[in-house]
Amino acid sequence: MPQDHIGFYDPAVCSLKDFQELTTQQTSHADVPLASDVQKNVPIYAAQSLASDLAQERRRVLSEWAWVLGQGPGVFVIKGAQPNLAAIDQATETYLQIIAKEKAASGSGADHFAAAGSNDRIWNSLQKLCLTAPEVFAQYFASPMIDAACEAWLGPNYQMTAQVNLVHPGGQAQQAHRDYHLGFQTAEVSATYPAHVHDLSPLMTLQGGIAHCDVPIESGPTKLLPYSQLYRPGYAAWRREDFRADFEERYIQLPLEKGDAIFFNPALFHAAGENRSADIERMVNLLQISSAFGRAMETVDRTAMCLAVFDALKAAQMDEVSLDAVIASTAEGYSFPTNLDSDPPVGGLAPRTQQALLKEAVLSGWDKTTLATELAAMAERQKA
């Protein structure tokens, strides 16, 4: 049977040779003309110089990034994606307070693909930052570059989630893996999904990270194998020892500076690196962004977030592009699921979204009581 006609993937028949042929490709600057540099096969984009292209030729930028993530090396870096370093520092301080509070309450546990004690993790750091420090949250997510990267792979109305990972000096590396959805299933469960669902899974999420400090190589930035997302049976192969050994021989790492962002296809073979430094507490806010058409990994109370950040958004008086970026990371952007008896489409094919409601509230100068009333009414209409 031709490879393209295989209905299900079996780890036993995965070909390391085919995997190696795909992952020895080279990225040329002609492939990524908007990039300022290509390092170790990874396109590097300078946010400051790319800003005019994003404003004037947005679809050209998004198309290039979509190619990189899908057919290209599978990963790119945006230098200075969040240039507001004060907002990052304020978010860092808030996250450290949250870590201390959570450790005092329950101690620390094991992380995905890493041993317990090597790091501190904040699950749902998105909502926790928003509710704890809404003014900081508003400035932190006011990044048109991050918003554009999410839209390039997932389209509009994506669902932002985030988890902070703080890796201490001496923190051990993760094992090579793929990520959510099928990457978070056992090998046995993953094998029950048809091959075409293995193709679908990477289209449902985007992995990203915002550096909260300078991340030199010795501190263990993410280990990556460019082009490995192209190996279609990769969700069946990544647990095999020969594939993991090949990854360990050929992975690359890129240093990051505070405010840089990295984005990669969730099917890319990757793993957090070992923190070999003596004194660098490596903090990265890991973004896991989901398609409007998929299911996010974490439950997020977006109504509570809308109410928490509302006054900060009114006071910030930011430009509309930045406002849209914050709202995209805050409110629900998709109309469904809903109850079409009580929440029918008005003036279109889909009911109004929470994002549209929050934006109107900010631009029209509503008070929080009015917003709370309208959000509650929207939630009531959506109930079965």
Image (tube, helix red, strand yellow):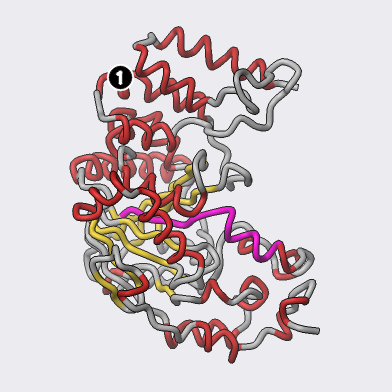
Q: Which residue is mark 1?
A: 314
Whether residue 170 is visible here, answered yes or no, is: no
Q: Position of residue 14 (x, y in %)?
A: 68, 84
Outermost residue to the bottom? 17
Q: Position of residue 39 (x, y in %)?
A: 29, 75
258 horizontally vs 292: left or right: left
Mark 1 crowdedness (10 Å alpha carbons): few <14, some 14-19, many ≥20: some
- With respect to residue 239, does 101 lie above or below? above
- With respect to residue 370, does 247 lie above or below? below
Q: Quadrant of residue 171?
A: bottom left
Which is more toward the observer, 127 or 384?
Answer: 384
Instruction: Identify the image quadrant of the N terminus.
Output: bottom right
Specify the amino acid type for callout 1. Answer: Lys
**What residue is rendered at 42% in x and 85% in y?**
250
Residue 373 in the magenta stretch? The answer is no
Whether residue 8 is visible here, answered yes or no, is: yes
Which is more toward the observer, 37 or 138?
Answer: 37
Which is more toward the observer, 234 or 3?
Answer: 3
The local secondary structure at tag 1 comes to helix
Which is more toward the observer, 318 or 345?
Answer: 345
Q: Position of residue 378 (x, y in %)?
A: 59, 17
**What residue is rendered at 58% in x and 34% in y?**
334
Instruction: Identify the image quadrant of the C terminus.
Output: top right
Q: Position of residue 22 (x, y in %)?
A: 52, 83
Residue 202 in the magenta stretch? The answer is yes
Count of numbered circles on the image: 1
**What residue is rendered at 31% in x and 37% in y?**
142
**What residue is rendered at 49% in x and 49% in y?**
289
196 horizontally vs 302: left or right: right
> In the image, which residues are magenta?
197-210
- With respect to residue 299, does 383 lie above or below? above
